[in-house]
Every structure is written in C-alpha cells, then in structure tokens.
Image (cartoon, rainbow, N blue to C red):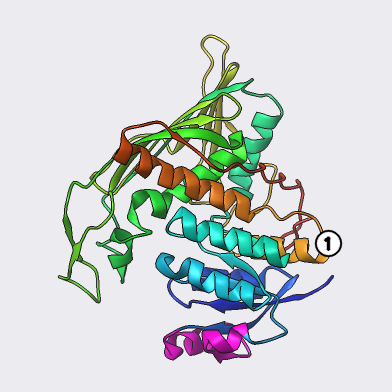
Amino acid sequence: MKITKVGIIGCGAISGIYLKNLTGLFRMVEVAAVADLIPERSAAKAAEFNIPRSCTPEELLADPEIEIVVNLTIPKVHAEISLAALNAGKHVYLEKPLAVNRDDGRKVIELARKKGLMVGCAPETFFGGGIQTCRKLIDDGWIGKPIAATAFMMCHGHESWHPDPEFYYKAGGGPMFDMGPYYLTALVNLLGPADSVMGCTRVTFPTRTITSAPKFGTVIDVDVPTHVAGLINYSNGAAGTIITSFDTWGARLPRIEIYGTEGTLSVPDPNSFGGPVSYLNKVKGSEWKEMPMPFGYTQNTRGIGVADMARAAASGRAHRAHGDMAFHVLDIMQGFHDSSDTGKLWKLESTCQRPAPMPMGLIDGMLD
C-alpha cells in the first residue's frame, strides 16, 4: 500500500482528533509536518503526536515530499491557504466550509481543476456507520421514493464553552456556515443535489458576551445572521426544510428526518459518526424500530476524508468528500442568505454527484 505524506496547517482545537486518527488509525498516510502561525502550538502538537517536523506554513508548503495539505485554519483564511497549497502543487483537504463566499470557493475549485489536483472538504461524518446505514436504507428502497426532509440545529451559540469563539459571529460563521455543512452534506449524500432554495434570516442578539476562559467578559459584535430558516428543492423532486440557529435556548426537534412514500427514516446527529438509526414503515400501527448498523467507523473518525483522498490519489478512483460537493453546499448556504436579502427564490448555479457509498465490513483503518 502506498503511504502518502501529509502536512497539517492549523493546530487549533480541531487538530487533535485529526492527528490522533491520521497517526494512529489510517495506514495509508503519514503526517510529515505540522505548522501554525503560533510556533508554540505546532511544536506542542508535534511533540504530542510524535510528528517529525514543526515548521511555518511556508516551509510546509515548500516541502516536496508532502502530497496533501490538511487545512485546519479558521474559515476566513480557508481559501487563501487552499490556493497556496494548490499553487505549491499539493492536493488540499480542509475543514468546513470550503470558503466564506462563492467567489472564493469557485477560485479554489477552478485552480484545482486547472492543475489536475484534488480538493476535499469536511464534514466527513457522512462516512460514518450511522449515515451510511441511512444511505443504504434509502438506496435499497426501504422508505420508497423520498419526498421530503427536515433538518434542525438549534442552540444558543458557542461563546459559553469555546475558548476563542469570535469567528463564529463573523464572515464565514453563524449557525448556517458553522453547522449547516454537517446537515447539508448529509442530505446531499442521502438525496443528491439541489436546484433552488429560499431563505429567511435574522440577527436576534446584536452582541454576544463570552463566558468561557480565557476571554471571559469579552463582547463580540455579531456580523452575520444567527437564525437561518431555509427551504430546499432537490433535483430528485424532494422538498427540504432546514433551520440552523444560535438564538434559541433549546429545542426538542429531530436532527434529520427523511420522509418517503413507504416510510420515514430518522437520521442520527450529522455531527457524529454513529447512530442511532430508526425506521417507521407505512403499516398502520407500526412502531419506530432501531436499525442495526452494518458499517464501521461509528466513533469520531475525523481525518477519514484525508485518508480517502490519499487512497484516491494512489488508486485513481474518485474521493468521496470531493470539492464539487463542498462547493454545492457552500452555494446552498449562501443561497439562503441571498434569497432572504432579495426576497426571491434563489436558483443554484452548482450541482454535484453523490459520493460513492462506503463498503460494508471494512477493517478499521481501511477504506476499500
């Protein structure tokens, strides 16, 4: 098996789980270097995970042995770092979202095509056993023809627990750009691409006060909508409803449900890899049944998209968390905001292929 060397730029909170899995679980990759604008952070991660090199982002991009750059920076510089990696001749895999706007996202995708390189983007939770089980149930006709879907992410934001939460309320943040990718990527995987959207957005609280350490008491000016309600017209004829909010104090709504002509499917939290998965058929008096999950990767397996890209680069097959899907999700998210601003149905400019389903019975650390 070919071992692909990867380098990670951005050693913040999310990097730990990536490093844990890329150094300890997936056999097809080797983390050759880590980099951060704060040298102490990358040095600490290199020591913790026995990475041979801690360096600057520029030094990492100049390393000829590194084939994939894993971009774990904050959203507002996602496109900048991705473009630099592509210009350095590297494939790039980045945390969500692909970019903070369509124009930047389009530049990333177009440059990758021009250079014959791959772009991959989180979230990769749809690789997990929970959503893969839902994918198989839909593909095998358990709920008949999908006719509708609902998705809800309702909370009061991240300033009470995140150590550095300002970016959640700036460009590229907000509940849709932060959490929407989990829900919308899961829905594209389950239902396919969308044609058009409508949206309604608002800002309920113009400022937020941080109550977590180390920035307790800092006041954040809110620059983005913090409650986003959207309608989605899918290419297969299904109708979708989604609400993402940082303005609510709690809710008892489902995460995702898919409604079909023959039954209903309860999809697990798309921010996780596991279950439970529940199914209700059309028989009168039937009850919800929890379904077994015949797929692996039900634990937190962030980094699996990087490993899948490495396997794709080595074998020539398509990778699953591909850039066209990430751009389509970005197009949908910005479309909700554009529709709200204009008061009109927003026709999407993009489409994409559903990613290939995962095989059943995989050994941990393997992808095909």
- Which residue is identified by label 1? 315
> SS at mark 1?
helix
User: Which residue is at 52% across, 88% downward?
Assistant: 56
User: Residue 340: where, in percent of width, then height?
Assistant: 32, 38
Magenta part mainly helix, strand or loop?
helix
User: Residue 114: where, in percent of width, then height?
Assistant: 69, 64
**Range of magenta residues:** 37-61
Residue nearest the viewer, comparing 212 with 191: 191
From the image, which quarter does the N terminus lie in?
Answer: bottom right
Residue kind at label 1, given as amino acid type: Ser
Residue nearest the viewer, comparing 239 with 89: 89
* Extreme-top residue of the structure: 284
Res. 269 visible in picture: no
User: Residue 291: where, in percent of width, then height?
Assistant: 61, 33
Residue 197 as seen in the image, left or right of residue 186: left
Against 179, is 42 above or below? below
Residue nearest the viewer, comparing 25 with 195: 195
User: Which residue is at 25% across, 57% downward?
Assistant: 223
Residue 31 as seen in the image, left or right of residue 98: right
Q: Is residue 45 magenta?
A: yes
Question: For the residue carrying disc 1, how many other residues have a C-alpha within 10 Å: few (<14), some (14-19), or many (20+)?
Answer: few
From the image, which quarter does the C terminus lie in?
Answer: bottom right
> In terms of image quadrants, where is residue 342?
top left
Against 275, is 11 above or below? below
User: Which residue is at 69% across, 80% downward?
Assistant: 66
User: Residue 299: where, in percent of width, then height?
Assistant: 57, 56
Q: Is residue 27 magenta?
A: no
